[in-house]
Image: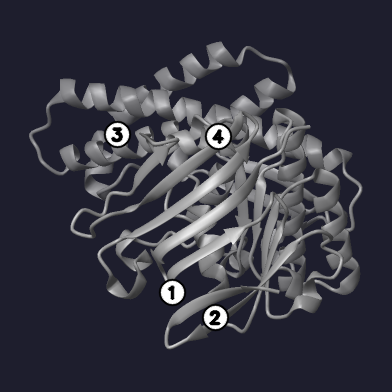
Amino acid sequence: MTRSAILTLRLGRFRSYDAAAIETGGTSVALHGPNGAGKTNILEAVSMLSPGRGLRRAGADELAHRGGPGWRIRAEVETPGGEVEIVTGVEDLQDTRRTVAIDGKPAPQTRLAELFGMIWLTPAMDRLWIEGATERRQFLDRLTMGFTPSHAEAASGYEKAMRARNRLLREPPWDAAWLDGIEAQMARHGARIARARADALTRLIAAQDRAQTLFPRAELSILGAMETRFHQALATAGDTDTLEAEEAAELARRLAAGRTRDAAAGRTLDGPHRSDLEAVYASKAMPARACSTGEQKALLISLVLGHARAIAETTGAAPILLLDEVAAHLDEGRRRALYAEIRALGAQVWMTGTGPELFDGLEGARQFAVSETDGISRLAAA
């Protein structure tokens, strides 16, 4: 089995780091130090090697060190297709568009999803099951990109077309032909999104069903009519190509019929951007939103591990895992179970914690002590 791993990571004026460099040798990385020292900033930098705004969803101006002119991340990455160099950043905050270069050539952010998989778990996600649907959709879409890299492009295209439609609906009289074209784009992207999400759900369920783990199994479903129909078709070996065309045509029809309603609401009220991810603690038949905080955390870890197993089975390479302050919330038994599953997967994991004792059992990991003085973070090999 091939693997994905960050081999080197170099930061320039990113968050609390003026400069930093980590050589991993392809092993896992454990970062420890006091709260506020800058550990999560390293994980955030790694997350910027994937499409989007990273694990904190921060704006470009928030990432620059001490309000500087810009920031840069350079990494050498081992991928299933071979080693690549990725450089990303913002040169000047007057133009906050993040640039990406792969092996020295400019590339769209969506290309990053095609190179390797990545998934993260942060303390902010502990409330995933009780927050709004937006956070769960974003989580689901990151899982989906691991199976279908083009999902990033479809999601971006859908959002762009939806914003254009919403703007037009605010400015009557409407150009019906122009709206028809925009809604056709939304519908094509929307059908692709729903199909990819349903495929991801099917693979995650299968991966969890085959697993024997100390972490609780989650029964998953997507609350969305389009995704439900695709999921049913996948379960019965139906023709999903034909269904995708049918779903696109039907969504375009509904969007056209809903223009007056959506104009009054000021937003689009139909489509896969309204879907939600639902989980149930299987052995207790209890919705995740009703579980204790510890149970919700365990369900999230179970889902991340299931995703990693499914990615490894599908692509032959486990995704890179970013686990921020996860170990501190696990007892010793579950912590060792987590590390055993990571070893079995062959996955590279980047973890943070307040002390090195939390990483006992994470064999072969390179450890770094993180400290902060006067707002500047520093790394030291431990």
Q: Distance between the residues labelled 4 and 2?
A: 31 Å
* Real-space CA distance between mark 4 and mark 1, rounded to the nearest whole angstrom: 28 Å
Query: Does the image show residue 353?
Result: yes
Spatial separation of the CA atoms under disc 2 and disc 1: 9 Å
Name the residue that disc number 3 marks: 161
Whether label 4 touches label 2, CB < 8 Å? no
Q: Where is residue 29 in the image (x, y as percent from the top left)?
A: 69, 61
Residue 363, compared with residue 209, is above or below; it is below
The residue depicted at 53 percent of the width and 32 percent of the height is 114
Q: Residue type at mark 1: give it.
A: Ser
Q: Residue at x 54, y 11 (%)?
A: 242
Q: How crowded is mark 1: few (under 14 residues within 10 Å), some or many (20 or more)?
A: many
| CA separation in Å, label 3 and label 1 | 36 Å
Cβ atoms at labels 4 and 1 below 8 Å apart: no
Looking at the picture, does residue 18 appear above or below residue 11?
A: below
Could you tell which of marks 3 and 2 lies nearer the N-terminus?
2
Residue at screen point 85% across, 74% down: 331
Residue 111: name its quadrant.
Answer: top left
Location of residue 222 in the rendering, given as x and y in whole percent from the top left corner: 61, 41
Q: Earlier in the sequence, mark 4 or mark 2?
A: 2
Residue named by callout 4 = 115
Mark-to-mark CA distance, 4 and 3: 26 Å
Mark earlier in primary sequence (3, 1): 1
Give the secondary structure at mark 2.
loop
Q: Mark 4: which secondary structure?
A: helix
Q: What element carries label 1?
A: loop
Q: Is residue 226 visible?
A: no
- Horizontal arrangement in the rendering, residue 128 relative to residue 180 (left or right): right
Residue carrying label 2 = 37
The residue under label 1 is 16
